Image (cartoon, rainbow, N blue to C red):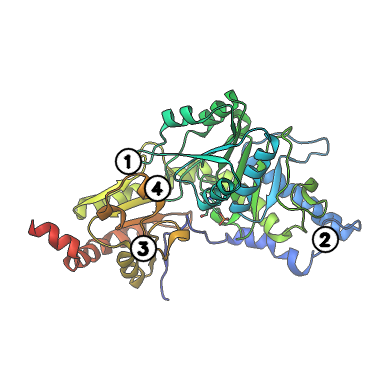
Amino acid sequence: MDQVIYFDNNATTRVDPEVLKVMLPYFCEEYGNPSSIHRFGGHVAAKIESARRQVAELLGVSFRNKDGEATEIIFTSCGTEGDNSAINAALAARPDRKKLVTTAVEHPGVLAYAKELERRGYAVERIGVDERGRLDWNALEAAVDENTAVVSMMWANNETGTIFPVAEAAKLAHRHGALFHTDAVQAAGKVKIDLDSTEIDFLSIAGHKLHAAKGVGALFVRRGIPFKPLIYGGHQEQLRRPGTENVASVIGLGKACELARIALPEETRRLAVLRDRLEKRVQETIPLVRINGDLEHRLPNTASISFEYIEGESILMMLDMFGICASSGSACTTGSLEPSHVLKAMGLPYTAAHGTIRFSFSKFNTQEEVDFTAEKLPAIIERLRSISPYWNRRNEK
Ligand SMILES: Cc1ncc(COP(=O)(O)O)c(C=O)c1O
């Protein structure tokens, strides 16, 4: 393909060449096992510890043990593993409590595990959201009680970018003796995270959403919380996540976190300008569009736009003809004809939910790419509406 305009960064991001550069020596040159006693392994172990500190710095975690290690960070294989591990550990830490409170708009990394827990006899409450994707706080307050082992709430939603009040929710959970987990897979590197100033007990991230490799992630576990692992094996990660480390990817994740931390203030502003520019141009040039999500509290990089009376899949196909990659919901629901569970929970009418496209930006996107896309969209939408039975029926009325 000649040109690719990649606006699907909430699905995954391009590995930053600087990240790749620090990873490469760990395949064919520095290939020692970090658990080995010899210096070939010891050097790798030291690099893993420095990556752990880089992750901790991005997340605002200042604790270091006597050896200077950021032991509250555990490396995992992905965001999903972090989500499952945190909930599993929280339930084990509160064995007398049999309830999980979460939201209706979590990623399947939490929701599918919640379903499994229901099968095992746990009670699960899924708190709803309003039409802007904002959490129903009163429902949360009513749901968290003395039987609640853990509250799991995403920091930011992957489809709309809506940011949830996680710091307040962690306090609420603690008032009832429950633990608190947040899935920060979409938030990390896009908004400031300062775990030291919150009561959050567990937080999961995934490398591939912030320009590190796929198949690596990290889980923050506040010190003092007993941690029952999800899998059993060797002594790696202080027995909390056995298995030989994904060394190159872990070192790359550290670098990606460092780069994200340094760029954050400026990038946050720049991404919001790109997002707002696209939304404004679309609203000016195309009738019957909606911008979804909490417009005051959302990720700077995410625009969720509903083009009413047409199918999102057709829009994606026509955008693809111009090399523009976007998404019609989360990648995990692609292939299903159902509107996403997030848009459904927001109560979007059928005719809007089906025509919803997510444009998600990264540091590699430019204003030229936004302008090119904004120029192409009106004709695409007009063409699709002209052949849409919903649109034609609406106009006949
Ligand atoms: C909010 C959120 N949580 C969890 C995940 C899962 O991450 P991974 O694919 O690394 O398991 C994703 C991925 O899309 C996500 O957006």
Query: For the point 28% across and 63% down, which residue is it?
Result: 311
Between the C-alphas of marks 2 and 4, the distance is: 41 Å
Q: Name the amino acid type tagged 2.
A: Asn
Instruction: Looking at this view, name the residue that lies furthest to the top.
Output: 175
Dots 4, 3 in contact, CB < 8 A: no
Q: Is residue 98 left or right of residue 290?
A: right
Instruction: Looking at this view, name the residue that lies furthest to the right.
Output: 38
Q: Name the amino acid type tagged 3.
A: Leu
Residue 21 vs residue 229, the one in the foreground: 229
From the image, state whether disc 4 or disc 3 is nearer to you.
Answer: 3
Between the C-alphas of marks 4 and 3, the distance is: 19 Å
How would you rate the neighbour count of disc 2 (Cα within 10 Å): few for under 14, some for 14-19, many for 20 or more? some
Q: Name the amino acid type tagged 4.
A: Thr
Q: Is residue 282 above or below residue 72?
A: below
Residue 132, horizontal then vertical, whole percent: 34, 40
How would you rate the neighbour count of disc 4 (Cα within 10 Å): few for under 14, some for 14-19, many for 20 or more? many
Pick whichever of labels 4 and 1 is earlier in the sequence.
1
Dots 1, 3 in contact, CB < 8 A: no
From the image, state whether disc 2 or disc 4 is nearer to you.
Answer: 4
How would you rate the neighbour count of disc 1 (Cα within 10 Å): few for under 14, some for 14-19, many for 20 or more? some
Q: Is residue 364 above or below residue 167?
A: below
The residue at which mark 2 appears reads as: 33
